[in-house]
Image (cartoon, helix red, strand yellow):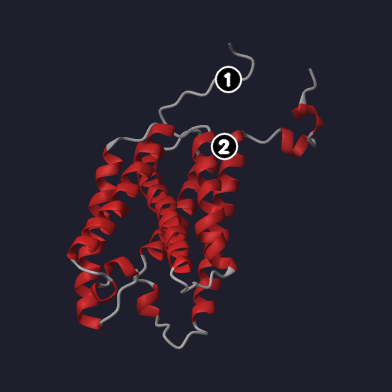
Amino acid sequence: MLDVAKLLPPTIRDLRPRSIVGAVRLAFAVTCAIALIARYSWGLGSATFTPYNYYAYLTIQSNIAFTVVAVLAGVVALRAERDPAWLTALRACILTCTVTAGIVFALIVQQAGSNTVPIDVPTSDLVLHFWLPPLAMLEWYLSPGRGRASWRTIAFVLGYTLTWGGLTMLRGAIVGWFPYYFLDPGQLSGPLEFVTLSGLALLVFAVVGFGVVALTRYRRKAPGSN
């Protein structure tokens, strides 16, 4: 059987797997940071854009956290053969939020289009919400040295989301602006729609969190094993 590894240049073939993982994580961090800056710059062109509102989005907060944690995880991968348990737990929480934010963003764009109120989606949003999350999930699943995440990850994520939601509603009542339409009483038909849409968003967080944790508990067979 052809050994693909022998076809690679020696400098690449001799790299430790964890070195490759570290480089990939750092590349994710750089890409995410560039996309966040580009998204901020793009928003400056809007008359309604304000920096305070930009940082109020859960999607933006989760991607800022993803950038920071990806740098940390990349450095750890370059220096150690295994990720410490606290890093796995932190990455599980951030990845759950990032992936869920992408799903929710896609649903918002689809819903807006259905209501003939299309939302502009710049390339930076495509990177942040549609390209990076699946690639990060793939790295999460394949990376050697990543331990098992705890099921408590789901509780932490839901706790953070509920806290963010409560603070966002309080801020929105004061400044008259909400980051997402399903939180804005002025765009909803009533309390029932608010509870329904918010409950669905929390359900997505829980399902994604379950998937993120479950991936760390699925054993991949080594090449050539039965």
Q: Please rate how many residues cluster around mark 2, counting C-alpha atoms within 10 Å: few if below 14, some from 14 to 19, many from 20.
A: many
Query: What element does badge 1 sit on?
Result: loop
Q: Quadrant of the C terminus?
A: top right
Residue 23 seen: yes
Q: Residue at x 53, y 65 (%)?
A: 125
Q: Is residue 57 left or right of residue 10?
A: left
Report the residue marked by disc 1: 222
Report the residue marked by disc 2: 18
- Counting from the top left corner in percent of width and height, residue 202 is at 28, 51
Q: Is residue 198 left or right of residue 5?
A: left
Query: Which one is nearer the viewer's eye here, 133 or 20?
Result: 133
- Counting from the top left corner in percent of width and height, residue 156 is at 26, 47
Q: Quadrant of the N terminus?
A: top right
The alpha-carbon separation of the residues under discs 1 and 2 comes to 17 Å
Q: Amino acid at mark 2?
A: Arg
Query: What element does badge 2 sit on?
Result: helix
**Of the residues under marks 1 and 2, which one precedes in the sequence?**
2
- Counting from the top left corner in percent of width and height, residue 137 is at 50, 43
* 36 to 156, vertically: above or below: below
* 95 to 110, vertically: above or below: above
Q: Farthest top residue?
A: 226
Query: Which one is nearer the viewer's eye here, 201 or 213?
Result: 201
